[in-house]
Amino acid sequence: MKNSIGTSVILTLAGESHGEMIVAVLDGMASGIPVSEEIIAARLSLRRPSGAADTARREPDRFRIVSGVFNGCTTGAPVCILIPNENVRSADYERSHLLARPSHADYVAHVRYGGFEDWRGGGHFSGRITAGIVAAGAIAAEALRRKGITVGTHILSCAGVQDAPFSDVDASALKREIETVSAMDFPVLTGCREAMEARIMEAKADGDSVGGVVQTAVCGLPAGVGEPWFSSLEGVIANAVLSIGGIKGIEFGAGFSLAGMRGSEANDAFCMQDGAVRTSTNRSGGINGGISNGMPLIFNAVVKPTPSISKPQQTVDMDTQSPATLQVTGRHDPAIVRRVCIVVSSLVAIVLCDQLAQRFGTDYLK
Amino acid sequence: MKNSIGTSVILTLAGESHGEMIVAVLDGMASGIPVSEEIIAARLSLRRPSGAADTARREPDRFRIVSGVFNGCTTGAPVCILIPNENVRSADYERSHLLARPSHADYVAHVRYGGFEDWRGGGHFSGRITAGIVAAGAIAAEALRRKGITVGTHILSCAGVQDAPFSDVDASALKREIETVSAMDFPVLTGCREAMEARIMEAKADGDSVGGVVQTAVCGLPAGVGEPWFSSLEGVIANAVLSIGGIKGIEFGAGFSLAGMRGSEANDAFCMQDGAVRTSTNRSGGINGGISNGMPLIFNAVVKPTPSISKPQQTVDMDTQSPATLQVTGRHDPAIVRRVCIVVSSLVAIVLCDQLAQRFGTDYLK
Amino acid sequence: MKNSIGTSVILTLAGESHGEMIVAVLDGMASGIPVSEEIIAARLSLRRPSGAADTARREPDRFRIVSGVFNGCTTGAPVCILIPNENVRSADYERSHLLARPSHADYVAHVRYGGFEDWRGGGHFSGRITAGIVAAGAIAAEALRRKGITVGTHILSCAGVQDAPFSDVDASALKREIETVSAMDFPVLTGCREAMEARIMEAKADGDSVGGVVQTAVCGLPAGVGEPWFSSLEGVIANAVLSIGGIKGIEFGAGFSLAGMRGSEANDAFCMQDGAVRTSTNRSGGINGGISNGMPLIFNAVVKPTPSISKPQQTVDMDTQSPATLQVTGRHDPAIVRRVCIVVSSLVAIVLCDQLAQRFGTDYLK
Amino acid sequence: MKNSIGTSVILTLAGESHGEMIVAVLDGMASGIPVSEEIIAARLSLRRPSGAADTARREPDRFRIVSGVFNGCTTGAPVCILIPNENVRSADYERSHLLARPSHADYVAHVRYGGFEDWRGGGHFSGRITAGIVAAGAIAAEALRRKGITVGTHILSCAGVQDAPFSDVDASALKREIETVSAMDFPVLTGCREAMEARIMEAKADGDSVGGVVQTAVCGLPAGVGEPWFSSLEGVIANAVLSIGGIKGIEFGAGFSLAGMRGSEANDAFCMQDGAVRTSTNRSGGINGGISNGMPLIFNAVVKPTPSISKPQQTVDMDTQSPATLQVTGRHDPAIVRRVCIVVSSLVAIVLCDQLAQRFGTDYLK
């Protein structure tokens, strides 16, 4: 499937960092979902670089919806959104494009595509492509919202500074937290923003970059979504989230800390609450046996430090196959942790629309 | 795809814990791969419960290959392997099957399948089904081995006891480590087996269970395998590995520890070695931009403590929707960390065969 | 997908003509569908050779359901059915297996699988594999029947003898016709059986074979099933039906005769009937724009004469690449038109279960 | 997959008849394929209405390639082509859009999408969308041509006037015929154009329309492409071709005429020719057992008369569910047989690129 994801609701991405535009096609969405350009614009603005801690490349993201929407609602036909690249400065890349940037996709692209790849700004591997995810995800998120399902992501840690985790048992507290962070351009639950930004700016001053962990929560997802074995809800979410550049790991619920627990600590006891089956803890992150159990769905994803740093680095010239020293120029983020939050939420919204449509039919979200 | 995984090479699983047999169908393998019943049997024995630290249910795994193999080699048609269940004792489950076992799939199965699910021993959600993965994976692993690609998994930690990690830069050292652990029924790189087993037995004595982390490495995978965005090598491996019951997280290369690094520490500098492009560290776990870079592919997966413990637990009766206390009987593992190693290696072998066939054609592995 | 078909409801086939057994795995069927071994046996008997006009190979089809059924109903987990091959006589094939039988799959199998293919009796390409389609299709047909949807196939022509076509506008007449032919071992609507059988026996006496056209109808399918463009209902049915060996063409509604009509003849005028939108003719075969329109779904498929004939034929030796004369021995049908009817109905039933599950959710058929 | 087709090489379509533009995304093409805007334009011109026998709507098809091409060649990333709709006159449709046009998709779209569908000019179901198939197919056809594989389609019959069939055994004669018809805006092999056009104009004068049969041939396809059972080459081609609006049937090789043949007539005897295995006839249309046999691949597809005719027709008002009389206005083709030829060739070229990439790897076409 390469640049498409989903079975009933399918996102396809095209475009390059320094190409003419980013293209997102969202196919299979139920008809009748209201599409608000304001909501799409607002969500795109959360992804956009904005402060000193972000890249100097500022794209206005003047998107156009060119199909699949009629009289303000989805028609059921594929929705195509175009997002022009307006602020392109390829000259930064020209001198050095045969010097593979360490931990970036340059080298694998060269091997995979034999030198025909568009190397300008990372080409099709660039984080710029995630603008398409956010634009399409805005429609998916709205469809979910109408069914009482909300998705939010915040920075759980950045450059060693911790935020508090989401509430994972109390659904109404979680719902408020999701609302709160979803409106923030620097989404954190506690007053850790300043400390995080300070660390990011320190790294930038050193010509370096930092990473972090983002935490995503879904509230309102019904029990019984997902499949055993090879379409587990954990698996399909992981496949989606790990496709985002820079994300190198994912853990559901208590995740890696489960390794040190005993079963009696790790197990989530079932209980009745307001006539519904719930669990009194949520180490499982809302998923058992690959299927949602009706509790909040929670996962963490690790974001590596941006590989594009201005410190000199050892590398090789891909043409001559000889050692070289690289000093990356161009405009880059010293941390993408902030900007990746809305990307993860958007992609998860699309994945959940797909899961719900597979489970309950193509009209479920209508 | 539910119980099938793959595009060019496809594994389909059927069967239940207490049903007649486990069925694995491996479709799309190149023709001409030698199939050794001894190798399959040997790999199944690594998955089989064997000591005091494992479940008392001991299955002989007398498998039969009923299609797709002719004159000792794969024909290119689907290979179907049947593994009878011979040691079934369903009575253990009868009394309590409406009491959902905490953190097990009982409740979600009840919601998803409306009470029609086979609840005996976890039914289709049981770890017993992984016998099919191991049997089919033995053929995949052999196909890879003929191309110089080896896959191995060891216990990186169990119940708080650590093993040493795989060599992640030195391919020849790694190759030896993979060979070593692949032959061990308790796969560890250092002398930590006794300490781990002691902790497992302690938990068992307490009617409890423990978890751990397993580490998998692939040696010999060529650069250029995988796709950008939604078929990233990380994504397809994560989707596969997270489908294994009890695995709740995965991280590639330095994984979650990347969150605390700076780019200058996290980046893997490129270098020339013996005429080939390599990296001098391997924080990326052999994958950049979703595509293999020719370095060892390394990932860790966390295995939660077995949810079936004999300590009394709070739960609900799914029929009456009332609180209840459950004391799980039946035969269970106090830790599945040991047994899951060969399952992960086998599934990854199948996924890599699929990736290689997609990339280089259906005859590549021939 | 190779030997699997479907998205929400998926059939996977394995097995060879002279192997141990045929294996069918039906995944994704809703839970709670009653499974009757009698119905499966009855449908398998319609596929079984029975008279002088069929092959002398008679298989008892003593199938076993080894997973996915519990307490008489589907569980929602994959249903695996095993059908042993009991009446195998491979010696017929040994002498000549390098002589490619004209218009059979021997040569392409040799090219595709490089000589590793199981050539006994056509191996995995044999019509014997369709027993798996019929067994799995019996469950699908029963699921459809519970929703008021029936599927039937009759011989529209054989060896130049014509049967009458199905009623294509009057749904209640069609429903009765489907019931009638579905119970017949030689399914025709008029008294043409004797004439057809006489022609078949004539061909057999000449060491030759004959072909024909089968017609399939579906009654009760709701409007609105199918997708525009690449998942058109016509396309998915055609893909399924053309996978059956010997079928070389398919036409929906008036099919190829539309080429000679004018629009004013070909168009199906809409009308109201008993409060429902209907059409007064059904040249479209129940499908417009790739989506069902609520009228009976009707298509014809052409079945070529069985390629295995005992007359001497010119061919080549695939090993020496030299011309040769072949006289096919073994046990073969002089016509498969009769036996293919239940295969087409069964496969279409599975395809429609898949389409309905995609459209209305996984529990729709429950 | 809805509006996407393919596994390794994937086409996705978006757009509506009266929307802003048609969008085609071609993903998975090998890198390094030269992309000529002239060739794309030339092929689009073959699809464009041009004479009195075509619709009065004339679109300039000023396409733009906005991704996936760099320095004149494919990069391996998805190629997105935008084709603006410039000559839109929706007012024709406004008065009558609730009157379902007989044998058109209006009614099923209304049922499937609940009234939210874009009904202007048939919306997403319009033949206008095939411009995207032709544009993307131009790249696929060029990739095939570089490997010696050519695809061509001509009008085998139109309104009762017959053309001669393609040569189906003599590959070099066929190759020339393909070249000839591929350059013709009214592709026929004999001097039947005038007679066909006369019949079309007669129908037009009567406010009516006509249908026909198109024949497609592929020359140079290697043997061994396709899979048994559910990915048969016949099945995947049929699925593609039947997705084109107006096509209601397909037959391979001798097709429906096989029904009246005996095996001894229908079978294609194998022979050696210039050191290669060939067949002396080609009733099979180049496919045995679902796999190409190295002979020319030949199939016919029936195109129904254009459903939009200006004669008054009985229909229903979809809103009031009452009978109504419809007189279609708007600009329509009295026959689409001519224009559909390049659409079929283009779609088959894409399907074959996909099949070849699956069989021989993603770099095969490079």
Image: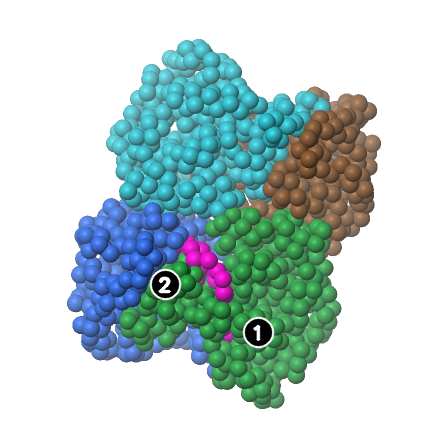
Chain colours: A green, B blue, C cyan, D brown
Residue type marked 1:
Thr
**Residue drawn where x is 46% and y is 65% of the image:** A297
Q: Position of residue C158 (x, y in %)?
A: 47, 17
Q: Does the magenta stretch include residue D70?
A: no
Which numbered tag is attached to residue A272? 2
Q: Where is residue A121 in the image (x, y as percent from the top left)?
A: 65, 71
Q: Is mark 2 on a helix, strand or loop?
A: strand
Identify the residue at horizontal 39%, vertical 69% (top origin): A282
* Left or right: B364, with A13 as reference point: left
Q: In this view, does C234 lie to the left or right of B322?
A: right
The numbered disc on residue D206 is none
Chain at numbered mark 1 = A
The residue where tag 1 is placed is: A180
Q: In the rendered structure, which disc, 1 or 2, sits on the residue that comes first in sequence? A: 1
Q: Viewed as shown, does residue C276 lie left or right of A58?
A: left
Question: How many C-alpha atoms fall within 10 Å of the one at disc 2: few (<14), some, or many (≥20)?
Answer: some
Badge 1 element? helix
Q: Which residue occupies the foreground of this view, D165 or B152?
A: B152
Marks 1 and 2 share the same chain: yes
Residue D17 appears in view: yes
- Marks 1 and 2, Cα distance to the nearest angstrom? 28 Å
Residue D353 lies, with reference to residue D265, above or below; the image says below
Residue B264 locus on image (x, y percent): 53, 83
Q: Are marks 1 and 2 in contact (CB under 8 Å)?
A: no
Q: Which residue is drawn at 67% across and 53% down?
A: A73
* Residue type at the position of mark 2: Met
- Magenta extent: A212-237
